[in-house]
Image: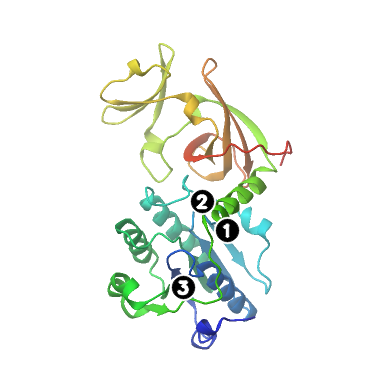
């Protein structure tokens, strides 16, 4: 193993460490590099490691738009295939957590709890959203929910003033490594596209009715309280307190209590695939929406056993063509 000189003190001070380490930093500071080094270090010492990746846009575990987790119990790190197709994942539906703060924090904490139950070491990688109110709130929520024994902030003291005050002595600030390379927008975009292409290459097709659609993630009560109705040919998804979602291509059908969704707008959307109880089965892409038959066709990859009953569209669109292979 080769540690950059800025971090070569970590193997010494963490030699007897047990528990959870969270790494926080803005983009291009080497968060993932540090997580990999820590994973290898602890695995070589014979410890089981749980790696939780909550960087939705630049995933190293699970596909983009998800929080992923994988267990490491051998000296060599898992391959890209093993990390990408992990059965431990939570679908957020976006490549940035800025509008999904609660979902990202809750799912990270949930997978960290699973990792903690299976390992001596849990490592948590985070996204680069940091120097904003939403970024600070996200990091503080994760710390509050997970309670890591140690948080490593890569950067300067002034950058982490708020988080240091919030978390105290368990928040260590370490310098960036001079050996970390920067990624521009194109590199980040190409990374996501490559992962999506790999993930959706071994895929199968499903066709289901509109009643299988949900517009909230499973941690939200509306996921379970939603009721589907077909009134005068218009698909309506109703919720408590007189709020409803309507699938219709005619805007005049809406009223002040309803939100109209044009079915065609769902095409090419990435979606989470769930059981009736909200258990994650895999990810898919909405390929076609048939307004006449009230059906949707999804191409996707199922990793966990169970019957596909529910589909939750995300905000990410995927227009790439994938090979006609089946998993």
Q: On the image, which quarter does residue 295 sit in?
A: top right
Estimate how packed mark 3 is, as few (under 14), some (14 to 19) or many (20 or more) residues with alpha carbons within 10 Å: many
Q: Is residue 324 visible?
A: yes
Q: On the image, which quarter does residue 72 sit in?
A: bottom right
Residue 61 got which mark?
A: 1
Dot 1 and dot 3 residues touching (CB under 8 Å):
no
Residue 281 picture location, percent across and down: 57, 44
Mark 1 and mark 2: Cα distance apart in space: 9 Å
Give whichever of 193, 138 is nearer the camera. 193
Q: Secondary structure at mark 1?
A: loop
- Give the quarter of the figure containing the N terminus: bottom right
Picture residue at 51% right of the left edge, 51% below the top: 66
Q: Secondary structure at mark 3?
A: strand
Q: How is the image coloured?
A: rainbow
Estimate how packed mark 2 is, as few (under 14), some (14 to 19) or many (20 or more) residues with alpha carbons within 10 Å: many
Q: Is residue 85 above or below residue 315?
A: below
Of the numbered discs 3 and 2, the one sitting upstream in the chain is 3
Of the numbered discs 1 and 3, the one sitting upstream in the chain is 3
Residue 66 got which mark?
A: 2
Picture residue at 30% right of the left edge, 73% below the top: 161
Give whichever of 206, 184 is nearer the camera. 184
Give whichever of 261, 107 is nearer the camera. 261
Residue 298 picture location, percent across and down: 59, 32
Residue 50 picture location, percent across and down: 55, 67
Q: Secondary structure at mark 2?
A: strand
Residue 152 picture location, percent across and down: 43, 75
Which residue bears the numbered disc 3? 21
């Amino acid at each position: 193993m080769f540690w950059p000189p800025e971090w070569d003190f970590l193997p010494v001070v963490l030699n007897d460490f047990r528990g959870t380490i969270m790494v926080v930093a803005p983009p291009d500071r080497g968060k993932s590099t540090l997580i990999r080094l820590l994973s290898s270090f602890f695995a070589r010492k014979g410890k089981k490691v749980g790696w939780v990746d909550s960087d939705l846009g630049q995933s190293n575990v699970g596909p983009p738009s998800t929080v992923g987790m994988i267990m490491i119990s051998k000296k060599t790190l898992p391959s890209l295939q093993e990390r990408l197709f992990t059965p431990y994942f939570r679908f957020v539906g976006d490549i940035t957590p800025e509008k999904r703060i609660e979902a990202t924090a809750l799912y990270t904490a949930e997978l960290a709890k699973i990792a903690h139950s299976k390992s001596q070491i849990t490592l948590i990688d985070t996204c680069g959203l940091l120097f904003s109110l939403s970024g600070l709130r996200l990091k503080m929520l994760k710390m509050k929910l997970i309670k890591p024994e140690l948080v490593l902030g890569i950067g300067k003291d002034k950058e982490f003033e708020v988080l240091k005050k919030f978390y105290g002595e368990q928040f260590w600030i370490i310098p960036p490594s001079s050996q970390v390379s920067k990624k521009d927008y194109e590199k980040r975009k190409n990374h996501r596209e490559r992962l999506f292409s790999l993930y959706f290459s071994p895929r199968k097709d499903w066709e289901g009715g509109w009643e299988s659609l949900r517009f909230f993630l499973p941690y939200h009560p509306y996921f379970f309280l939603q009721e589907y109705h077909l009134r005068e040919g218009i698909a309506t998804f109703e919720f408590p307190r007189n709020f409803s979602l309507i699938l219709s291509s005619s805007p005049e059908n809406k009223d002040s209590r309803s939100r109209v969704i044009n079915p065609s707008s769902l095409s090419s959307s990435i979606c989470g695939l769930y059981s009736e109880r909200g258990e994650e089965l895999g990810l898919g892409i909405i390929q076609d929406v048939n307004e006449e038959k009230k059906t949707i066709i999804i191409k996707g990859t199922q990793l966990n056993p169970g019957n596909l009953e529910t589909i939750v569209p995300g905000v990410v669109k995927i227009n790439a063509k994938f090979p006609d292979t089946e998993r």
